[in-house]
Amino acid sequence: MATFTGTIIAAHGRHYLAQADELKLQCVTRGKKTDVAVGDIVNLNLTSPNQAVIESIVERKTLLYRSDQYKSKMLAANLTRLFIVVATEPAFADDLISRSLVAAEAAGIEAHIILNKVDVTESLPRTRQRLAVYAALGYPVHEVSARTAPEHACETLMPLLHGQSSIFIGQSGMGKSSLINLIVPDADIAVREISAALDTGKHTTTFTRLYAFNPESNIIDSPGFQEFGLYHLSEGMLERAFREFTPHLGHCKFYNCHHLNEPSCAVLTAVGAGGIARMRHDLYRQLVHESSQVLY
């Protein structure tokens, strides 16, 4: 059997598509294993001209997860940058942004925010105000309009994507697909090819897929989602994933402080003084609660 190394470019259920040089190979795992993510580099054994078995996964640099109380879902592997796409309209959820940022911090992935539809000027001041809390934490906010200023959007985003393995995430309606189509002009054709190869029928938006748009860069598009569960993160991982907590960690009265309601807590003192946004601490409190509910 011929052995290849390939990159997983799409996943649908337990069916995967790998790119190995010029070949696109339909892949399955041995047994019932489903621990393969888009972006994984895998070792393959060819079983027919266009089919292969995944024998092993090369050690990952990073792995981005979502999880709820009962199960976890891998979004993508070997990412270096995460782009959260929001828009002036429709309204976006701060909870989703904050959770995505926490997930990126926990996974060691650099996070950026893309504000799309800046041509909707009526909503722009309020939207900028809402995003200021994240900009103040050091997360870059890039303003674009895929519809009315596509050239500027490309000029803004291409340098950020070059040499990176990036993922675009966001709620439906934010213009994520429009941005990806600007960056990868043949994305629609690629999606149809992937759908045919994975036999997904018309469900072209329900799977994550990777587009390589030059030899050094790729971009992963994930289905739109409204919630980003982080039940898999422990309390210790969570406190380190809120970057504004960092200067205060180790300065609480109690060494095992949970930063929830303990006396002389440096984090709570910073919240009271306005050094940490109350919205962010409320999310931390919610995530700590969720991490204690895990059943899987």
Image (cartoon, helix red, strand yellow):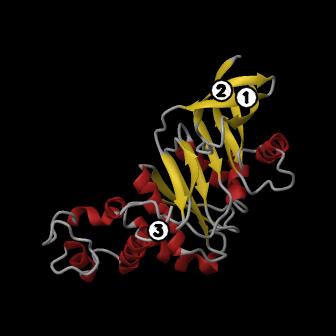
Total residue callouts? 3
Q: Looking at the image, which residue is at 46% across and 39% down?
A: 61
* Mark 3 residue type: Ser
| Label 1 to label 2: alpha-carbon separation | 6 Å
Depth check, front residue: 112 or 53 = 53
- Tell whether 128 sits left or right of 225: left
Q: Is disc 2 placed on a helix, strand or loop?
A: strand
Decide: marks 1, 2 in contact (CB < 8 A)?
yes
Decide: marks 1, 3 in contact (CB < 8 A)?
no
* Mark 2 residue type: Leu
Q: Looking at the image, which residue is at 82% across and 44% down?
A: 189
Give the image quarter of residue 278.
bottom left
Q: Which residue is mark 1?
A: 52
Give the image quarter of residue 197.
top right
Mark sitting earlier along the chain (1/3): 1
Q: Which residue is mark 2?
A: 44
Give the percent coordinates (x, y) of residue 115: 58, 65
Q: Which residue is mark 3?
A: 98
Q: Is disc 1 placed on a helix, strand or loop?
A: strand
